[in-house]
Image (spheres, rainbow, N blue to C red):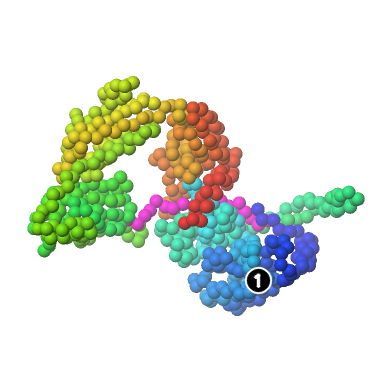
Amino acid sequence: MKKLLPFFLLPLFVLSVSTCANRGLGPQGGPVDSIPPRMVRSTPLNGALNYQKKQVEIGFDEYIQLDNPSENVIFSPPQKQQPLIEARGKHIRITYQDTIQPNTTYTIDFGNGVQDNNESNPMENFSFSFSTGTNMDSLEVYGTLIDAETLTPLKGVIVGLHTCQDDSAFEKLPFTRIGKTNSEGEFTIRNIKEGTYRLYALQDLNRDYIYQPGERIAFCDQPIKPYITVRTEIDTIWRDSVTNDSVYHLPDSIYTAEYFYFEPSDILLQSFEEDMQHTYLERVERTERRNIKFAFVGKQPSMPQLKALNNDSSPSWDWLKETKYTFNPKGDTLTCWLLDTTTIKTDSLCLVLSYHKTDSAYQLQPQTDTLWAVYRMTQAEKTALKKKKRKKTEQKETIQILEIKSNARNTFEVFDTMQLTLPTPVSRIDMNALHFEKQNDTLWVQQPCQYQATDEAQHTWRILTDVQPGATYRLTVDSAAVADVYGLTNNAQTFTWKVKALDQYATLRVHVEENNPLFIVQLLSERDQPVREQRVKNSEVMFRNLAPGTYYMRIVVDSNGDGKWTTGSWKQKRQPEQVFYFRKKMTLRANWDFEETFTFQQVPLLEQKPRSLIEKATNANKKK
């Protein structure tokens, strides 16, 4: 809430500012300068009326510098052509490029950008304004912008007002008045005219102050109407009573004063990115002779269709008939595995790819491209070919082996699943040649299990079984148990792993103040990323087998029941799903049971997220 000085104290304040001593060039040494610059003159005066010129000059009492003016200085109303800013010596000169509009209040918000030249002490929240008409618009609104999913304050985001009540103005017209969020996500929009407005936040990527699909946004559900309130408060004037020993501060008189507050002053905007992304073909690559990869930006809704084209360097038949297709788990990379020997040896292959691509409105549309998949020999292959030609004898080919990899390791989590991974599609696997065993003392005992392929090409296999905490297991794969589509087989391999014992884990029981089945409690890492989650049942959740360490916690209100946090939608005028944070950090130790009570309704949303997580997010953004 913004509080202004009572009118009868303003002359005293002005007198105290004007009598401050000037700092000159004194001797070297002494205390470090901690006093920010002070404005001493300007053309026009700050708050001037009927000023029609395009140039503003501001003078200060010491040499100054402007910190990143293109980012820190905000002009309101927003300008199509950014004004020119020059900072020289003790002066700042600003020249407007757009036409100056009549009867308009212009605001130059420097934030903390004006600093002294020696110690970089900033003038905090420095703002300058003038009017081209006979009145100065003087209303203000205040608020905070946070990320809707993580509750992290967002810095450097434009927050703007529209006089037009139609939501289409956000997509067609620049803002009427704007402000910008600081490092705490706080924003101020100054010099507002009386009226009713729509309020938005916009991560304006192209700086046109108009929403474009794909830009991060926030919006107020209801219109706002800025106003000033007057409150009567009782204050005390103190006097000093000096004795031989000390100074006593005694009440001299009590007075009643009227203070003026700008409202609304507690707006909370929750920013989100809509669930939309441009989808298109990014590249086609053939780094190996045996396959062609099609990398997309965004997930393809269905399997793309391929058609072979004949050309001078390709086979005369449809070489795509003898292929296998695999999609990666994200659905954004299609691999075409070539099986025909003649096709594999052909350097350039021509094909037609039919897939889906988004248009400018982020709508998926069918797209067909004619593409070339060209294989270029590596330097090692070129060298080997030269040696072969020079010696005129065939070199003995290295016997290729199908290598099987696994996620087995000495310390295996009790909740993990053992997996086998192969580099190429599998054509045959002999389950009888796979031996899954558990160690009992010095003996290995066969254990029942199921082998499950996780994809159509059978690249990855999961071993489904009940494991015993603290036990040691091994999987033996006999020689030639697995063959890929190119006829390669494996050597005999053995994988051994030990499952952690239960006394190496912690248990956490969480009591939730509201028994809401839509609540999903998420445990978070120190990087603010979910590591475990569970839906609330009977006002609590139980997390077992937690690795010792530091955790945080939040609740996602899964309003649509899809099992995850859902972002907002501008088109549907839908806010993102609510998120609440547990206020403190939790340190869990092995072989301990912990209990916490998650209360959030009595805690303001801006006070919920632990400060340590906010600081880490802020530092991470600075490094980007």
Residue highlighted by disc 1: 63
Q: Is residue 100 rendered to the left or right of residue 16?
A: left
The residue shown at (50%, 38%) is: 551
Q: Position of residue 602 (x, y in %)?
A: 60, 39
Question: From what the image shows, is residue 214 above or below residue 81?
Answer: above
Residue 261: image quadrant is bottom right
Q: Residue at x 14, y 49 (%)?
A: 397
Q: Is residue 442 left or right of 42 when viewed as pictured?
A: left
**Residue 440, percent from left and from top:** 32, 21
Q: Between residue 420 and residue 378, name the one nearer to us.
A: 378
Judge by depth and name the residue closer to the eye, 424 or 53: 424
Whether residue 272 appears in magenta in the rendering, the answer is yes
* Residue 607: quarter of image: top right
Outermost residue, right direction? Answer: 244
Q: Is residue 390 visible?
A: yes
Relative to 282, 28 lies left or right: right
Tell me where the magenta segment starts and ends, as one range: 261-279
Q: Position of residue 595 (x, y in %)?
A: 53, 29
Identify the residue at the far bottom of this view. Answer: 53
Q: Is residue 116 magenta?
A: no
Mark 1 neighbour density, 10 Å: few (under 14) some (14–19) many (20 or more): some
Give how far across and how far down residue 339 sits, in percent.
Answer: 14, 49
What kind of residue is marked 1?
A: Tyr
Residue lying at 81% horizontally and 51% vertically, measured from the top left: 236
Q: How many marks?
A: 1
Helix, strand or loop at disc 1?
A: loop
Position of 494 compared to 197: left or right?
A: left
The answer to which of 125 and 516 lies nearer the viewer is 125
Name the outermost residue toward the front: 391
Q: Is residue 252 visible?
A: no
**Up-down relation of residue 537 to residue 85 (above or below):** above
